[in-house]
Amino acid sequence: MEHAVEIENLVKVFPAHFGGRPVRAVDRVSIRIEPGQVYGLIGPNGSGKSTTMKALLGLVAPTSGTCRIFGADSLAVDSREQVGFLPENPYFYKHLSGAETLRFYGKLCGLRGKALDARIDELLELVDLNDARDRRLGGYSKGMLQRIGLAQALIQEPRLVILDEPTAGVDPIGSRQIRDLILALRERGITVFLCSHLLEQVQEVCDQVGIIFRGRMIREGRLEDMLAIEDQTELVLRDAPPELVDEIRRLVASADGAELVRAGKPRTTLERLFLRETVDRAE
Amino acid sequence: MKTLHRPLNPRRIGVLAFHTFTQLVRMKVFYFLALFAVIVIGANFLELPTHAAPESSGVELLYAIKNTSIGCMSLFSIVIAVVATGLLLPKDVEDRTLYTILAKPVPRLDYLLGKFFGVAALIFVSLAVMDLLMSGVLALRLGGVLEQQRAAAEAFGYPPDLIESQLAETRALGPTWNLQGAVFVVFLRAIVIICVALLLSTFSTSTLFTAIVGFLVVFIGFFQADAREAYFQGTGVLGRIGSAIMTTVLPDLQIYNLIDAVIEGKVLKALDLLKVAGVTLFYFIVYTFASWLVFARKEF
């Protein structure tokens, strides 16, 4: 099967400047992403995430190794027909409105006429910016900019979307909207390759995760497999009477080799609490 | 079926050029035109000291209008060519908008050409508007000057053929095709300067660097033909090679000085215009190719 992304032994060394030492930003990184997957590349700042993405987009040339998108060499312009990209903290042209921005990127991809008009309407609807379609981007909030950025990434209906820190600097509400959009993309069968250091968000949307540190891929696999604690089982009960809980405790105590590690009330996250008290209440 | 995104796609270049043009227009570059209008209309009211005979009066005024207008056009085209071109590329890198453009199926050569044609279109439209204004003011003033000269010559009792010949000389100072040719030469010179600024901005990371070096190259360009002659005169084959290299690396802007002759009322020969257009095309190809060589390998 053709991989959506195939990075083989990618090495990127930035040459030394002013007597400094060369920087090995990416060191023999290999990644394979199947079509339709949401892949999260996580790692601390400066670990090589963005460089890996830029190499995949042909914005930097690999020192060695190869990057392929649906089988096409990523240094070839044609490979970008299948890709949409949202960089970290993008500042689009402030003099354009939301609709004009999408029109500009659509035309660059060869879209014209009614097909382009329809696509612009569809995407503005998708990213919930229809009301701000004629407002110049100079007046957009950070979250709106990220959403219009996501819309431009999707303008030519790419099969792969690359997102570099898609929620950097965005408030929890905007962050949730972007997360929902990523989930909507997955439902449409679009492959998503995102990098972030916001681990909770990656955990919520990704099927597959790679951990990169100091330029090297140190762990990679299915998120469920990586997070599961193999020797533990979790039961979450709703409205359980105390007698039932006591009964379970007794059963566990009487079983051979089993041990009750923890019991109590599960906690929500601060993000969920915030959203419940703000957006959900407003809805 | 896969689409092959080959470079030099006119539609794609057109989209980028139109966007660049719009971007500059929305940066209120055209405000300069209002200033130009004030200057040209102001030049129209200049009371210049004159030593001309009464039958030749008004000629200085026509010179003044042309000199001021073409001077402003030259200044505007040079400043916009250097600053606007130097601003666009580093700004796209800084704002990361370049990433989103190059992440689309856009060859880097098309991106560069889009920027080039956008700035060129802005200068072309501006020069056209300025030319229209200058020609309008000249046409208005020329009518008055011709009437004044005819009355003076007739009062002196000059023969009709002499009067006609004198008036024909004055008409040559008005809004002639020669003058339109001179404005076109101003545009061609701007094309070369855009190419230089574009090349500089492919390896520079700041607008300031591009602007300073760009203006320096323009300054040298106005004198390099003299310097070339002084350095390489009588140095044989090596000298000729050195001279050719110098002319290629630093554009020879003295070639465009025939604008001054046109202001004086001299005829702009088609061959000279063709030669200037050919030199411009040469610089366009050389500098765009060099820009592409640098930009194609540039990492972001």
Image (spheres, coloured by chain):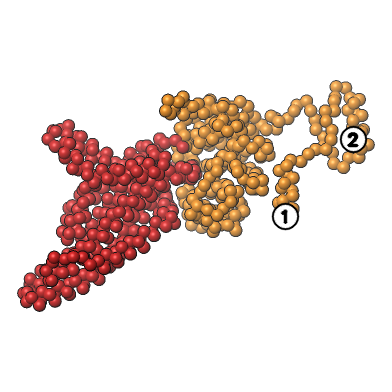
Chain colours: A orange, B red
Q: Residue at x 36, y 63 (%)?
A: B34
Furthest-top residue in this view = A257
Res. A224 image quadrant:
top right
- Closest to the observer, B71 or B26: B71
**Chain assignment, label 2:** A
Q: Quick one: B150 or B273, which is closer to the camera? A: B150
- Locate residue A238: give its quadrant: top right
- Cβ atoms under marks 1 and 2 closer than 8 Å: no
Amino acid under label 1? Answer: Ala
Q: Residue at x 66, y 31 (%)?
A: A222
Q: Gap in Å between the C-alphas at discs 1 and 2?
A: 36 Å
Label 2 environment density (alpha carbons within 10 Å; few <14, some 14–19, many ≥20): few
Q: Earlier in the sequence, mark 1 or mark 2?
A: 2
Does residue A188 appear in the picture of this structure?
A: no
Residue type at tag 2: Val
Q: Secondary structure at mark 2?
A: helix
Instruction: Identify the residue position indicated by label 2 in the image.
Output: A245
Please tell me which residue is depicted at 17% across the width and 74% down the height of the picture: B148
Of residues A257 and A25, the one nearer the viewer is A25
Q: Position of residue A57 (x, y in %)?
A: 50, 37
| Residue farthest along the right direction in this orientation | A243
Query: Residue B52 vs residue B109: left or right?
Result: left
Q: Chain of mark 1?
A: A
Q: Is residue B81 left or right of residue A57?
A: left
Residue A130 visible? The answer is yes
Residue A121 relative to residue B52: left or right: right
**Measured from the top left, where is residue B18 in percent x and y?**
41, 54
Q: Which residue is mark 1?
A: A282
Q: How many marks?
A: 2
- Nearer the observer, disc 1 or disc 2? 1
Question: Looking at the picture, does residue B164 appear above or below residue B205?
Answer: below
